[in-house]
Image (cartoon, rainbow, N blue to C red):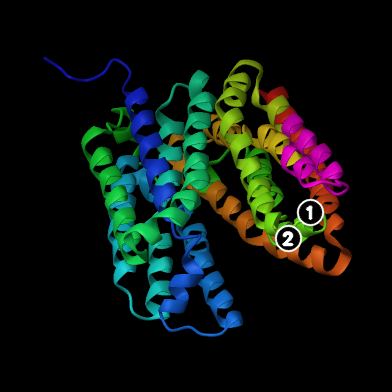
Amino acid sequence: MSTEMPDPWRRNLAVSLFGSFTTVFAMTLMLPFLPIYVQQLGVSGHAAIVQWSGVAYGATFIAAGLVAPLWGHLGDRYGRKLMLVRASLGMAITMSLMGWVSHIWQLVALRLLIGLAGGYSSGATILVAVQTPRDRSAWALGMLSSGVMVGNLLGPLVGGLLPPLIGIRATFWAAGALIFIAFLATTLLIREAPRERAVTKGRGHWSQVPHKSIIVAMLLTGLLLMLANMSIEPIITVYVQTLIDDPRQVTFVAGLAMSAAALGSVLSASRLGRLADRIGHAPVISVALLVAAALLVPQAFVSAGWQLVCLRFLMGLALGGLLPCMAAVIRHNVPEQAVGLVLGYSISSQYAGQFTGPLLGGFFGGHLGMRSVFLATSVLLIVGALYSWRALRRRQAEA
């Protein structure tokens, strides 16, 4: 008697959600104690510790952004499950090895390697986008996005609690063990639909994409989304200092402001995805960008910390549905044999936003004042909203 579930895509979604949460959760555990670990590895001096911590942290994102299209292309050819198995096993081994390093260059090398070998959540996005029925794709991708954001939210919190209890090195080993569980679940439980096998004979290329303008619009939207979320990161603590009288509350309020947007996105991602499945992706994407742009303006003129936290939360609610909607648009406008490649480009554009957002935020904040960061980001989101609306409506008219 067959043990297959009637809707295997639901089980794939559940396993992908679990794997994406656990891998992102494990990856972000190290954020609170990374500078301390860098110091334990022999780096001395405040400036050097901060510099090497930044290098070690950023190495993963740079490497992952560079190879995302490659893994997507290989997934198109050889199967998406294989990419998830590769990513989870590679991340489990590499994360565990971080607990054994004795020099800073070894930590940086492993952070680069985990970026090259990883990409579980991005691979899961491709798998879910391809195997979920089209009329449920935005909802499913919203659920997956919520799992990633919850991992980003809880990882640093738990990472601040574990090292005093079990030590920093043991925390790395625990993170590796957690990712290994995701590897086992992925290997044993995920099933690829038969149609996956057929498309692996083809080779996906950018030239095979018939509607390139709408794909470029989605790549730009992904970059702007991450840029909007990350542009405030370099200045938020300093900005909160101007709003809070008690110095002891500064880091607490700054942490709340950083987490508020992620929490809002967690709550809205699947709901906005379901709404987009019903009324279309164009209005959800464009309105979300415009609402976020509008919410950035009062953030530049708040007079209390709680106001900033509330506005960041509302901004997260507005932006939460963008990632699943973007992935669904790409899925609907790209041939089967090129879905992984193009979604890989989309993920790379998001990493580019994560990388450039803090750089631009720091530049504008340092040279033009902190308010300029919010206002400049607002203008960029308005431009992105208008461009995305135009591309999506043009594609709809052609259909």
List x then y, in percent, for residue 300.
85, 49
Q: What type of secondary structure mainly makes up the magenta span?
A: helix
Q: Residue, x 47% and y 71% (percent of image)?
A: 36
The image shows residue 51 at horizontal and vertical percentages of 58, 77
Q: Tell whether position 345 is magenta.
A: no
Q: Which mark is residue 244?
A: 1
Q: Residue 74: x, y in percent?
A: 37, 50
In the image, taking residue 263 as reference, residue 184 lies left or right, namely: left
Q: Is residue 144 above or below residue 399?
A: below
What residue appears at the point 60 percent right and 31 percent down from the top-left corner?
325
Residue for point 30% across, 32% down? 192
Task: Tell me if residue 30 comes above or below residue 206 in the rendering.
Answer: below
* Local crowd size for mark 1, using a 10 Å CA cut-off: few (<14), some (14–19), many (≥20): some
288 sits left or right of 354 in the view:
right
C-alpha span from label 1 to label 2: 7 Å
Quarter of the image where the C terminus is located: top right
**236 to 290, vertically: above or below:** below
Mark 1 lies on a secondary structure that is loop
Total numbered labels: 2
Span of residues in magenta? 286-310
Give the position of the N terminus as an image quadrant: top left
Mark number displayed over residue 247: 2
Residue 389 in which image quadrant: top right
The amino acid type, in three-letter code, at marker 2 is: Pro
Secondary structure under the numbered disc 2 in the rendered image: helix
Residue sitting at x 46%, y 32%:
129
Are dots 1 and 2 in contact, CB under 8 Å? yes
